[in-house]
Amino acid sequence: MKNTERLAVETTGNNMGSYEETYQSFDWSQVEKAFTWSQTGKVNAAYEAIDRHAESGKQDRIALMYSDPNRNETYTFKEMKEKSNQFGNVLRRIGIKKGDRVFIFMPRTPELYFSFLGTIKIGAIVGPLFEAFMEVAVKDRLENSEAVALVTTPALLERVPVDELPHLKHIIIVGTPEETPEGYYNFAEEMQKSSTELEIEWVNREDPMLMHYTSGSTGKPKGVLHVHNAMIQHYQTGKWVLDLQDGDIYWCTADPGWVTGTSYGIFAPWLNGVTNVIRGGRFNPDDWYQTLAKNKVTVWYSAPTSFRMLMAAGDEVVKKYDLSSVRHILSVGEPLNPEVVRWGKQVYGKRIHDTWWMTETGGILIANYPQMEIKPGSMGRPFPGVQAAIIDDEGNELPPYHMGNLAIKTPWPSMMRQIWKNPEKYQEYFRIPGWYISGDSAYKDEDGYFWFEGRLDDVINTSGERVGPFEVESKLVEHPAVAEAGVIGKPDPVRGQIIKAFVALRAGYHASDELKEEIRMFVKTGLAAHAAPREIEFKDKLPKTRSGKIMRRVLKAWELGLPTGDLSTMED
Ligand code: PRX
């Protein structure tokens, strides 16, 4: 298990100094004085991200650099301040109050960002939903959060079962007035009517700000709640991990429907006052390299699946673009293969810095830093102010090279504060006193580098997107041909894992490729494209416990040709 390969430091990074020394001396309270609220005791993270810069000499700096196949727009910090103020006023006029849930279900466009910031500015809780979600997924999330307002587009509105959502009172349409149904608000018209001055809602640092739904191994998706205080972590990890410096042009490829797209697609860059590149549209190697080259991106944060797809696209395509502006590259979301790190070094001339964290942690906890040697395949070392450890199920710390629970000493600034309306679920993460249990298994080496091993539950990570098998299984059994379904993650060289479903058919239905495709499309159009099984295998019967629970562990063993282990709880 010992790994001797090292990638040497390339740049020292201007920000952090020596990792060891900083780790020893740092404590989170040092960050507070960076912000206005250290003087007033009251805070608003959107103010700190945008208005603070607009009011301190950076008003004309470009905050948002947006492009998609049809639009090319830039907005300065001053313009971002005004647009988000206008949106805050729209919500106030409608009657939205502090603590109300306002959800945003739309593709990445500037309006998404104005809405996101404006919602936070009035103290409401923002919930961004990934645009690929279909009806059931949208309904589950809006229902559980009891969202009172939704910002969406005419096309996506079709997937919102408005009549079944009694709490949802207000819908704001980003589209033309003609496309805006009677009784709904038109985004542009409402913005037009609204002042660019807003009285910000000053809140306490522990007041709620943001919700992301995420999957566990059982049950429906869970609403992970974050508070304004998370900005402390977003800001400081932005400085020391993303190495953000004055004048940087930063591109995070994640959608705000996922936590990376908010913590590091909104807060970290803007809290640090740098230019944030946002690109709409789908993945395509040429477009991606062009985005880096055309915008002269200096810091680039993406995910292993994307790097693997870029690697598959070949080295020749890289040579067509001038990527010399890129200074720092980072990755998150799934294991970053050593060969991808080596390839990145070879074709980009840069190291790819892996980072580890989760929706629940709100911000980066373990990372590779510019001034630290990289051991390809390792997630790196804990962020200053963060204590990470490998512990057994009783809470004992394990020595180097012993696999166990990857756990974090509580608390840290961006830690989730609630699972929405589900305190029991929240408590499960903290079942060992003093620790947050991540659900990942990992080990630590003698230098304190952490190495990811796998999930300890059935959560699937496909292309860096977290999918709960239960959600997929629930959708599958709604199909008339499906009697039972069990869903697992199957290892895949590009996507990390793909979703594989084992399906037992109802009497009268016969296995065929057409039926497989039909079932796959049923999930794709009913739940979400990324949640649709890429592989379906029909079985006469699925392995179940006596209480009727599908044994995914056994399905996995079948798939991988491994021993099935203890079957004493299996039904006859
Ligand atoms: O299993 C770990 C994996 O992604 C999970 C968290 O997923 P999510 O909440 O969607 O957040 C992803 C982006 C913050 C973790 O429990 N994961 C995340 N980063 C890494 C990783 N696995 C291996 N290496 C990583 N660097």
Image (cartoon, rainbow, N blue to C red):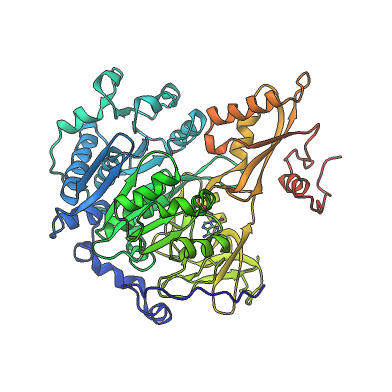
Q: Is residue 287 above or below residue 429?
A: above
Q: Is residue 286 above or below residue 395?
A: above
Count of picture labels: 0
Q: Is residue 452 above or below residue 513?
A: below
Q: Is residue 533 left or right of residue 169?
A: right
Q: Which residue is drawn at 55% across and 79% down?
A: 447
Relative image position of residue 265 (x, y in whole percent): 36, 51
Relative image position of residue 474 (x, y in whole percent): 62, 33
Quadrant that contains the N terminus: bottom right
Report the front residue among 354 and 568: 354
Q: Is residue 162 visible?
A: yes
Indicate the quadrant where residue 452 lies: bottom right
Relative image position of residue 48 (x, y in whole percent): 24, 57
Q: Which residue is drawn at 35% across and 60% down?
A: 326
Q: In this view, does 503 lie to the left or right of 529?
A: right
Question: Seen from this angle, which residue lies furthest right?
Answer: 572
Quadrant that contains the C terminus: top right
Report the front residue among 81 and 42: 81
Report the front residue among 441 and 88: 441
Q: Can residue 227 be seen in this view?
A: no
Relative image position of residue 33 (x, y in whole percent): 24, 69
Indicate the quadrant where residue 319 lies: bottom left
Q: Which residue is drawn at 36% across and 48% down?
A: 290
Q: Is residue 206 above or below residue 177?
A: below
Report the front residue among 251 and 546: 251
Indicate the quadrant where residue 385 lies: bottom left
